[in-house]
Image (spheres, rainbow, N blue to C red):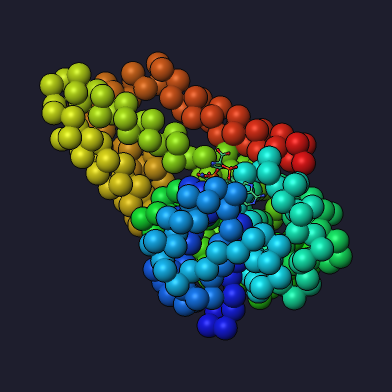
Amino acid sequence: MFDNQKIGMIGCGKMGSILLRGILRCSLVPQGNIRVADAVKERIEEIREGYPGVRSAENRDLVRESDILILAVKPQNMPALLNEISADVNPRQLIISIAAGISTKAIEKHLAGPVRVVRVMPNTPALVEEGATALAAGSSATAEDLETAVRIFEAVGSTVTVSENLMDAVTGLSGSGPGYVFVMLEALADAGVLLGLPRDIALKLAGQTFLGAAKLCLQAGKHPGELKDMVTSPGGTTIAGLKALEEGRLRATLIRAVEAAALRSKALAGDE
Ligand SMILES: NC(=O)C1=CN([C@@H]2O[C@H](COP(=O)(O)OP(=O)(O)OC[C@H]3O[C@@H](n4cnc5c(N)ncnc54)[C@H](OP(=O)(O)O)[C@@H]3O)[C@@H](O)[C@H]2O)C=CC1
Ligand SMILES: O=C(O)[C@@H]1CCC=N1
């Protein structure tokens, strides 16, 4: 599907470089078929050192040379970038945007003429091939475009396709979610340290507990409440811990966190 396709990526920061690594690790295309551009020259140098076959180009040249164009700059930089490249895009290209909050409609509006856009929300565990990615097709994207984008993001984890009005919710949950999990992980490790565990052992136990519980939930196909009950002996230790979590309103706090991030995603659209 990808062999003769040229992929161009504008914005090779945290998320763009993770994605690039995944594309190359899976050999979706040879290095020579990839062009990268970034406002920060050091980022390009780092990529060229790691992947000598990957070529760099200026934004507009890169756009003209790409069959698949991945836009991975911050949402606040998207309007200026879209204006810069609008004369160079063409309807034969697939444009993939990973920018939080920026709708396919806004991208279509900035780029003159009909353009095939797929909006995507990945997350950073893509670095270890455990990403969670949601994709939504714009008005001119074909089923094959969506399939192409899914193939790219399957290289770095699992994918779901959603209708675009759900992308803010996705952004608040899985896009931003690793941030919440890292805070919880750090807090669990801190608790272990408070109780006398060495930091490295506390972090290993906390991390593996998250990993194992998440895997159990996804693979067992059981409701998390049922799995929670399996851990919780009457009059035992877990129910004492759970009572403290309820007193600290952990559930309400997590729900509020996802809601706040989704609202921020919506607000970024207003910044367009
Ligand atoms: N980080 C994450 O966990 C996730 C991020 N995203 C989305 O991915 C996108 C990128 O995020 P992230 O990787 O964290 O951001 P970064 O700031 O790490 O990377 C973006 C890079 O793009 C460069 N850039 C900005 N404007 C241009 C331009 N016009 N031409 C070329 N390069 C440009 C930036 O340079 P400079 O620093 O000078 O601006 C920077 O090097 C965002 O839209 C974000 O919403 C999506 C899911 C998860
Ligand atoms: O914090 C952000 O805006 C980006 C988008 C989703 C995750 N990180």
Work out whether residue 263 can be spotted: yes
Between 219 and 115, which is closer to the camera in this rendering?
A: 115
Residue at 57% over, 83% down: 4
What residue is at 23 percent from the left and 35 percent from the top? 203
Query: Quarter of the image containing the C terminus?
Result: top right
Quadrant of residue 182 within the rendered picture: top left
Residue 122 can be seen, yes or no: no
Residue 194, placed above or below residue 72: above
Q: Give the residue at the far right of this rendering.
A: 113
Residue 10: x and y in percent read 61, 57
Residue 135 higher or lower than 125, as above or below: below
The percent position of residue 78, horizontal first and vertical second, equals 70, 47
Counting the numbered discs, the total is 0
| Apparent side of residue 261 relative to residue 80 in the rendered image (left or right) | left
Q: Position of residue 108 (x, y in %)?
A: 80, 57
Residue 212 relative to residue 3: left or right = left
User: In which quadrant is the N terminus drawn?
Assistant: bottom right
Relative image position of residue 66 (x, y in whole percent): 65, 71
Q: Is residue 215 above or below residue 90?
A: above
Q: Nearer the viewer, residue 197 or 242?
A: 197
Query: Which quadrant would residue 112 be assigned to in this image?
Result: bottom right
Q: Residue at x 51, y 25 (%)?
A: 252
